[in-house]
Image (cartoon, grey):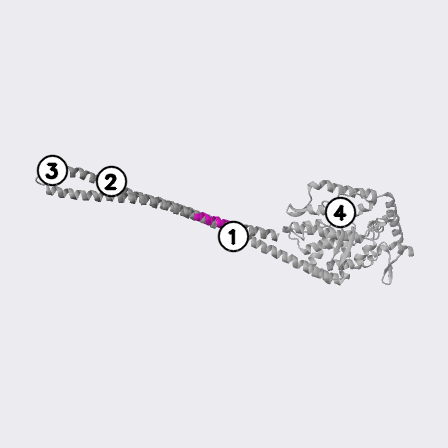
Amino acid sequence: ENEKLKEIKELLEEQLVLFQSEKEEFIQERSLLETIEIQKHDEEIQQLKIQSASYQEQKESAEESFVEEIKELQSATDKDGMRDKIVQGLLSQNGELKSIFTLSQKLNHSTCIMSTGKLSVAEKMTEQLQKELKQEQAESKKEIELLQEKITAMNLQQIERDKEVQEKEEALMLKIENLMRSKDNLILQDDIYGDIIIDNPLILKIIKTHQFQRLKDIKKLGYIYQNISKSTYSRLEHSIGMYYLAGEYVKQLQRRQPELNITESDVLCVQIAALCYNLGHGPFSHIFGLFLKEVFQSGNKPWEKVSEASVMMFDHMIEENDDVKNLLKEFLDNYEADIEFIQELIHGARTGQRKGKEFLYEIVVNKTSGLDVCMIDDTTRDAAVLGMNINFKWRVFLSKVEVRNENGEQRIFFQKDDLETYNDLFKTRHSLHRELYYLRKNRIIAIMIKRILVKSDEKPIIRNGDSHLTISEATKSMFTYTQLNDGILSAIKSQ
């Protein structure tokens, strides 16, 4: 972009030089025309002067003849006949002389008129040329001023762009320095997104906590791996995928719609919410929900939804890890407000905390359309387990999502032209429920595990300091709940 701006600037400067050159040529042509016209006028005046001089000579010759005739008249006074002839001759000559005088006067008068007329025409033409020249100069001046304004504006834009580029370069260099300083960069090879590079110190600390690492031992598809060997990926992988997709989602909006004023703190809040969305899951994922529903029939369930347990585990993680809390205070703009915002994002409940940024609540959990990062990562990852051919391209999807105002709120909108693609995604989701989640043999295994958990809940097997708790009792404290994962079956078996 800098090079294009420089090229445009150079082109405008070349056009300015060319215009000034044309202007000088025009002035020279005008001057040459004036010189030619004046020369023509001078030649005509010179010819008139020559004619006037010729008539003047004739006049002087006639006067000399007249004087001689007068002298002859005086010497011949005695002869009447001769005198009459002389008088008649003088009269006739006097008439010719008068005609010569008259012609000479007319010639002088016409010469003066012609000279004056020619000069006035030349003056008028000169004035007209000067007027046109001034007008051309004024227009040229305006065009030059406009060009100068454009060049100034381009220079200002160039300065701003240079400043932005410099800021980005500085930010990039700072990021590179942080990467070089940190020995804990994490590069994960993901089946859906390829290489996922995690370099943010806060995200790395969260991932390393015991509360998050617990998800490594909780399979996303529960006990289905007994029937489908590929379904062994954990809630941790799903959480990392959600974190990455949510980050790309909000950063795409940040780049394409800068008027939304999405801050880096906003981006980080969305990423943390996506990363911690699965913290509340128990052993074998949704199977544990069936267990809780049965053992807490009389009420007093520790939570109604898994998202509530995730928020509770998120709070417990902050309390148990001072380094995470300190980094949250360092990276977030407003610690208390942003922590509350992250909790709301996990719940999927909008409270109006981010006025004008309501769309941020629709990235991790979109209760309006259901098309959120949880559903997208969940569906694409599970479809890969069954080897389904899915047409949904997440990068194309993110490039077309945009935010618009609806009833005074900024909401996420999807492209109508891609409706068929979205329908295919939901059809795939439906197929997964039919062919994977609720497949008869998979449901049988799920029910068997639930019965094992319910039966085992009669005996305390979860260590709590010097005492032991039952599985259901362990859910009432996040400290003991952290110990629950898919390894619970081994603990039950060892009793």
Q: Amino acid at mark 4?
A: Ile
Q: Which mark is residue 103?
A: 2
**Residue interval drawn in magenta:** 16-28
Q: Classify residue 94 as left or right of residue 277.
A: left
- The dominant secondary structure in magenta is helix
Kindly identify the residue that appears in the image at 85 percent across and 43 percent down. Answer: 439
Q: CA distance from mark 1 to mark 4?
A: 53 Å
Element at badge 2?
Answer: helix
Q: Quadrant of the C terminus?
A: bottom right
Q: What residue is shown with label 1?
A: 148
Q: Position of residue 296 (x, y in %)?
A: 83, 51
For the residue pair 303 and 43, the one nearer the viewer reads as 43
Q: Earlier in the sequence, mark 3 or mark 4?
A: 3
- Which amino acid type is marked by label 1? Gln
Q: Position of residue 360 (x, y in %)?
A: 69, 51
Where does label 4 land, which residue? 376
Crowd tier of the residue under label 2, counting other residues whose Cα lies within 10 Å: few below 14, some 14–19, many 20 or above: some
Residue 309 visible in the displayed image: no
User: Gap between marks 1 and 2, in whole Å?
Assistant: 65 Å
In magenta stretch: residue 20: yes
**Cα–Cα span, label 4 and label 2:** 113 Å
Q: Which residue is mark 3?
A: 82
- Residue type, label 3: Met
Q: Nearer the viewer, mark 2 or mark 3?
A: 3
